[in-house]
Amino acid sequence: MEQMKLWDKIEKNKVQKNLDKNASTGYIDRYLSFYKKLTKDIENFPQQYPSYFIIIDFTNVKQKCMEKNEEWLEMLGDKLKQMATSNINEITEEIEEHHKFLKINPGNNESLATLLGIINSIQDMSMEMEFRIIDVQEQFRILKMYGFQVEPELHKKAENLGNEWNNLIYQAKKTDFESLQRKETFAKITQKEVLLFIEEIKRAYEKYVEEGPGTDGVSLDRGLELLEASKEQVAQFNKIREQKVRAEKLFDLPISKYDELIKMEEMNKKTYDLIYSIYKDHQNQVKEWSLKPWSKLDSQELTKGADDFEKRVRRLPSKNPGIEQLPPYIKLKKTVTGFKDSVPLIDRLKAPSIQERHWEKIIAQTRPDLGEINLKTITLSKVFELELQNYQDVVDEVLTEANAEEKNERNLRQIEQTWKTQQFEVVKYSKGNEERGWAIKSPDDIRAALEDNILNLQNIASSKFVRAFSKRVKKWEKDLNMINDVIDIWLIVQRKWMYLESIFNGSGDIRQQLNEEAKKFDRINTTYRKKIMENVAKKPNVYACCVASEGGSRLTELRNISTELDKCQKSLTNYLESKRNSFARFYFISSDDLLFILGSSNPKTIQPHLLKLFDNCKLLNFTKGDKVIAGMTSDEGESFEFEVPQKPEGAVEDWMTRVEDEMKNTLHVIAKKGIMFYAKEKRTKWITEQLGMITLVGTQVWWTFSVEDVFKRVGEGDKHAMKAELTKQSDDLNDLIAMVRTDLDDNTRRKINMLIILDVHARDIVDRFVRDSILSEKEFDWESQLRFLWDRKKDDILIRQCTGVFDFCYEYLGLSSRLVITPLTDRCVMTLTTALSFYLGGAPAGPAGTGKTETVKDLSKSLAIRCVVTNC
């Protein structure tokens, strides 16, 4: 409802703020109209209103609304009345003030100019004043329309405002007409004064050109005085010019030109001010510097200041082209450049490297008549008096010597300070939870410092300015080389000690077997740990440990320890070599692993290393409280039992040799049984009962027998024997394919997958024989195949290919995967077996990843020989 605005504080504050900002008449009129209309709406609202069974009485509400509405109307009316009163008073005062000025009787140019200015201003403000009068009259009309009480005098005053303004306009025009004759008289006087003033300026300009600050024969100091005088003269001329221009405008005269005055002013501002301001600043700065004592003079400040002034001078031509040809600029540039050229000499003499002996040398060779100079009290002006610029060569020589000596001295002090604080990083050396002593952490930072410092010393020693401290240089060269040698031998000794300590102190068995070497190591260990490393841990300073300790004999001491450790290590190496000679497979594990095995009385310590010793034996199967080795288990989990269980008794190499022999003997027995039962059982059943490697070799033996039997039957006249064999091979392959589709355990599935690879190859060979009519076992196509057969005389498996005959070696292969055989694989295998038959080697060649290594490994699996791949 609109009546709600009567109590809206936000709306009232907004209106009040707008009224305080001198709101327009229309703004107030709009709000007056709104609240006047609201008054009628409130009056017309019924006193009472029936609603169902009650009557609502609005008498009090209407009364409150009327009171609130009257407050708004009163506030707006008061503001409008205040505005109207203020405006009418302002206009009246302005009109009266202008009337007073129009009554002035001019007696000279200034008073006439004032009068004419008032007349012009009245004419200029005519339209604005008319709008103001209309606005005031509108304000009084609104007040009257809305019934606000206004004094009759103000109403009358508002009505007469238009007449009063018109009277002022008339009076102004009349006064302007009456002043025409006076204007003509004063105009003639003004013209004469302007001509005389122009002549005065021309004379001043001629003198400015001939004797001013820009002439060649004037010094910079005199030029600075002339410039200040010229600037004062130009300022006075400009004041007079402004008066003349105002008079010319007043009397409608053409404005005169003062070209010479403008030229003088522009030359001063754009040219000479720039030059002489730099000169003035430069002279003040040099004077300030000259008063400073030499000991407190900041050479960097001097250099920076000279550079700044030189830059300011150099930039002037870019701001004002042609300025570089003016005499003052040439003199300024010479002055600033001359000072700048002397600054480097002053700067160099201020260097910290210049000592009293250097000043004595300079004075002796330049101005010995000046006597001694006190560097604490001498000022820069006194230094200029020495005229050192005339002895540039002498000063340069002394400065070069001083700087070189100071640099060498600084480098030498830095080296000395480095080795006062440089320390070894010593850490506790532990094996498991047992602390074994102390060790030096890799001293990379120390080595880097050594290299830098030794190089610096070499540079210092080669300098011709090293005479003052040559003894110190030689001493430090000797000491740093000593530190370098000590660290080198120390790290070698530490590495040997750690290796041998873990062997002799970590294994009682090794100590028993190498009793003399163990005692010798104990003596070395006591010396190294107690006498050397514990002292280093307490005082780890590098210089103290390497040079100052033991009277400088640390290097000899460490060399002796290194020699003794070498003897211990040689004995240990000979011991390990004897073990490897006894059991050759130990060559394929590291010395640390071998020592771990030899040094333990528990035979199971060999278990983690079995895959390095055998082709595919992950575990030895221990029984009877780990006192009997009953068999082997492959990495895939396949296992077999030894025919004769072995006891891990005696030397490791001995019982491991027995285990190896028993592996081969047992696999020979298992292979013989498997081959014998092949023809008596169903093939699929036989496969599940045999070891993986036995199923492969047994299948290959019987395949060789079958094919050779086919050749025999063909020779007897059975022409379809080979085709029948192909059918049989295909059926066997299909049986395997059907079998692999059933629910099998992982190991059986691996076994069948390997058999499928061999059966596919075997079938392909027979298929090629059928296709190419290979009917004799003497043909090369058959001779070139790997042929497995059981030799009854040797009671063993033989493998033939071409002219080569090889024994089956019975290395346990477990269920390791086999390579798919291609014609290229066949050719590679034939080449390698032929080389072996001639006791030669093979070198498969080809791009990376094409199967060279895998082909060799697959051949070794066919022969049951262990294959060791060495990356070289």
Image: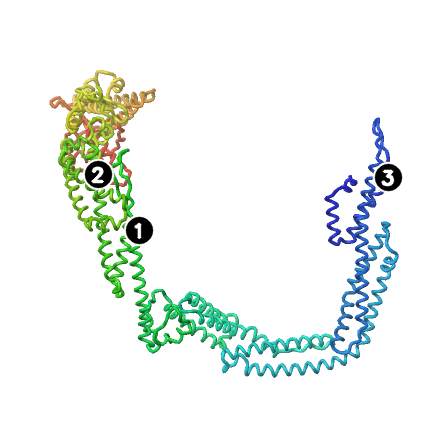
Please name whichever residue, 680 or 107, is drawn nearer the observer in this view of the structure. 107
For marks 1 and 2, give the CA distance.
Answer: 31 Å
Q: How is the image coloured?
A: rainbow
The numbered disc on residue 366 is none
Q: With 376 as the anchor, is 436 left or right in this view?
A: left
Instruction: Tell me the amino acid under the disc marked 3.
Output: Asn
Residue 714 appears in view: no
Q: With 23 as the anchor, is 682 left or right in this view?
A: left
Q: Identify the residue position indicated by label 1 in the image.
A: 421
Q: Quadrant of the N terminus?
A: top right
Helix, strand or loop status at disc 2: helix
Extreme residue toward the top, this view: 680
Instruction: Tell me the amino acid under the disc marked 2.
Output: Tyr
Above or below for 249 versus 785: below
Please name whichever residue, 476 or 16, is drawn nearer the observer in this view of the structure. 476
Task: Judge the density around disc 3: few (<14), some (14-19), many (≥20) Cα neighbours within 10 Å.
Answer: few
Q: Quadrant of residue 365?
A: bottom left
Contact? badges 1 and 3 (CB < 8 Å): no
Q: Identify the residue position indicated by label 3 in the image.
A: 44
For marks 1 and 3, give the CA distance.
Answer: 104 Å
Above or below for 681 versus 406: above
Q: Nearer the viewer, mark 2 or mark 3?
A: 2
Helix, strand or loop status at disc 1: helix
Instruction: Tell me the amino acid under the disc marked 1.
Output: Thr
Q: Nearer the viewer, mark 1 or mark 2?
A: 1
Q: Identify the residue position indicated by label 2 in the image.
A: 499
x and y, in percent, of residue 98 in the image: 79, 68
For marks 2 and 3, give the CA distance.
Answer: 117 Å
